[in-house]
């Protein structure tokens, strides 16, 4: 593949989003829309990569660097149309020879494979300009592609200017193009703003190139792939489309979803073969699940690693830094944060494990808490292999429970427990015969006096 540069238009303010956040930073599947676009483009190894932003948009600049290190950001100080936005990138393309891809930061579903096909079409068809097009189910509002008898593109007709016959055309323009760098530099300064909005439109390049006898062709993709996002309704539609894509790929790769539409995946969720996902599971970014693991219903997992054949949930929460080893069990209403639960260990009920290690084959009783925070700093709890922690125990960190040790139920442990020892840290039980009967009689008498 020959040299590729990209220009990503990301200066939209997101007015229809009703948000202070720049539009391209709104997320789908746990990643900003701009991140999705740049990640797709990264497969082409673009150099240079230019992102056109609004003025004073450091968050957008940071996001660009996050997903495509070395990306150059330039500001579009006036919002005068798509061609004007690309003009801001021309100085960064002054010495570039090859194909320039123009992309949009609010079209997050475009695939790397599709962008590669655009670039390949330039080479294979000897085209000067390639348009990414789609066949619209309802073409209303889209620009239609006009073709000659050879199938080359001669222009793009916007709906407001289309004849009744042209409005029947379903082959529509996505806005994404691949264009020869020399042609872009030659045509872009000649684009006029002589139109109703007084803006400079990138689509004008098509007719200009065709008029010069340049070869302009199109490449087809699915309509969903070039879905644009301008408001929260479209954001939700893009989210649904991305979730469907991610679930289908996960199932094709060998994961089982009992109710796919109820499971939320992030862009980087990694599910090995034979993983079983029950309904209503949420995966945030940074989750890896090993072969044969089971994630039971209503679990919430982010930035966590789950080894093969572990059992998670139902109603479990794994927070950042949770590492669950092979065959370990995390049960209902258990929260794990920045902690390692080693092979075969069991944390089955109503428990918080934070800033800790739970050793192999240890058993943590219901209601156990690692008291890791003193109001100022976090402290570590180390629970040895095969230790047994009785129900409703509080382990006040920093503290170490030795290998094979027992902690009696209801204990508050503030000192290290040696290996194989029994630790009891609770008041001695006292039984007072007849106390309950006398107490009830007393309270009933008081109630009669006050009634």
Image: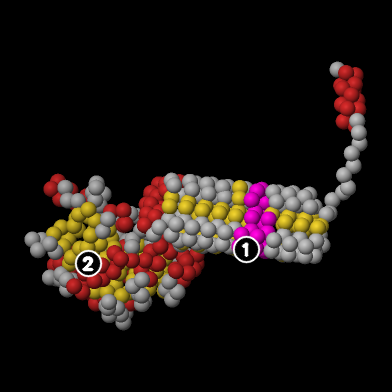
Work out which quarter of the rendered image holds the N terminus and state it: bottom left
Q: Who's the residue at 37% across and 54% down the image?
A: 248
Which mark sits nearer the N-terminus, 2 or 1? Answer: 2
Q: Residue 203 placed where, x, y %?
A: 24, 62
Q: Where 255 sits versus 115, above or below?
A: above
Q: Nearer the viewer, mark 2 or mark 1?
A: 1
Q: Residue 152 placed where, x, y %?
A: 14, 64
Does the magenta segment cover residue 2? Answer: no
Q: Who's the residue at 46% across and 59% down the image?
A: 271
The residue identified by callout 2 is: 130
Q: Who's the residue at 38% across and 64% down the image?
A: 37
Q: Where 26 sits versus 190, above or below?
A: above
- Asked whether, in this view, residue 285 is left or right of residue 407, the answer is left
- Secondary structure under tag 1 reads loop
The residue identified by callout 1 is: 342
- Asked whether, in this view, residue 321 is left or right of residue 61, the answer is right
Does the magenta segment cover residue 361? Answer: yes
Seen from the viewer's position, the closer of residues 168 and 397 is 397
Q: How many marks overall? A: 2
Q: Residue 102 placed where, x, y %?
A: 31, 67
- Asked whether, in this view, residue 20 is left or right of residue 160, the answer is right
Contact? badges 2 and 1 (CB < 8 Å)? no
Q: CA distance from mark 2 to mark 1?
A: 54 Å
Q: Residue 329 placed where, x, y %?
A: 60, 55
Q: Where 184 sits versus 10, above or below?
A: below
Q: Which residues are magenta?
A: 340-363
Q: Who's the residue at 77% across and 55% down the image?
A: 407
């Amino acid at each position: 593949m020959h040299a590729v540069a990209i220009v990503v238009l990301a200066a939209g303010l997101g007015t229809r989003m009703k948000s202070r956040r720049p539009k391209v930073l709104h997320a789908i599947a746990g990643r900003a829309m701009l991140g999705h676009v740049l990640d797709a483009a990264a497969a082409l190894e673009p150099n240079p990569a230019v992102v056109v932003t609004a003025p004073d948009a450091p968050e957008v600049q940071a996001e660009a660097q996050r997903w495509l290190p070395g990306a150059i950001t330039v500001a579009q100080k006036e919002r005068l149309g798509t061609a004007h936005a690309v003009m801001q990138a021309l100085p960064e393309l002054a010495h570039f020879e090859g194909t320039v891809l123009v992309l949009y930061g609010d079209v997050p579903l475009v695939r790397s494979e599709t962008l590669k096909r655009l670039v390949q079409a330039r080479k294979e068809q000897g085209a000067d300009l390639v348009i990414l097009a789609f066949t619209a189910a309802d073409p209303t509002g889209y620009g239609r592609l006009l073709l000659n008898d050879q199938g080359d593109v001669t222009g793009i007709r916007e709906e407001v200017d289309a004849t009744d016959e042209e409005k029947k055309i379903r082959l529509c323009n996505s806005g994404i193009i691949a264009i020869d760098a020399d042609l872009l530099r030659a045509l872009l300064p000649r684009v006029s703003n002589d139109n109703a909005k007084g803006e400079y439109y990138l689509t004008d390049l098509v007719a200009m190139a065709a008029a010069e006898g340049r070869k302009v062709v199109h490449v087809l993709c699915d309509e969903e792939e070039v879905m644009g996002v301008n408001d929260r309704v479209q954001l939700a539609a893009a989210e649904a489309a991305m979730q469907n894509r991610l679930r289908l790929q996960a199932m094709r790769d060998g994961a089982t979803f009992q109710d796919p539409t109820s499971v939320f995946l992030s862009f980087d969720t990694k599910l090995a073969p034979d993983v079983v996902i029950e309904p209503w599971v949420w995966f945030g970014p940074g989750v890896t699940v090993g072969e044969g693991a089971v994630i039971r219903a209503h679990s919430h997992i982010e930035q966590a690693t789950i080894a093969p054949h572990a059992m998670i949930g139902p109603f479990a929460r794994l927070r950042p830094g949770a590492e669950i080893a092979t065959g370990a069990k995390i049960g209902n209403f258990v929260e794990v944060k920045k902690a390692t639960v080693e092979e075969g260990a069991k944390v089955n009920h109503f428990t918080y494990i934070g800033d800790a290690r739970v050793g192999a084959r240890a058993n943590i009783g219901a209601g156990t808490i690692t008291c890791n925070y003193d109001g100022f700093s976090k402290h570590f709890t180390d629970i040895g292999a095969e230790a047994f922690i009785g129900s409703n125990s509080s382990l006040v960190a920093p503290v170490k429970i030795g290998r094979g040790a027992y902690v009696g139920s209801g204990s508050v442990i503030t000192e290290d427990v040696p290996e194989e020892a029994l630790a009891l840290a609770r008041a001695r039980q006292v039984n007072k015969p007849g106390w309950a009967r006398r107490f009830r009689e007393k309270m009933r008498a008081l109630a009669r006096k006050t009634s």
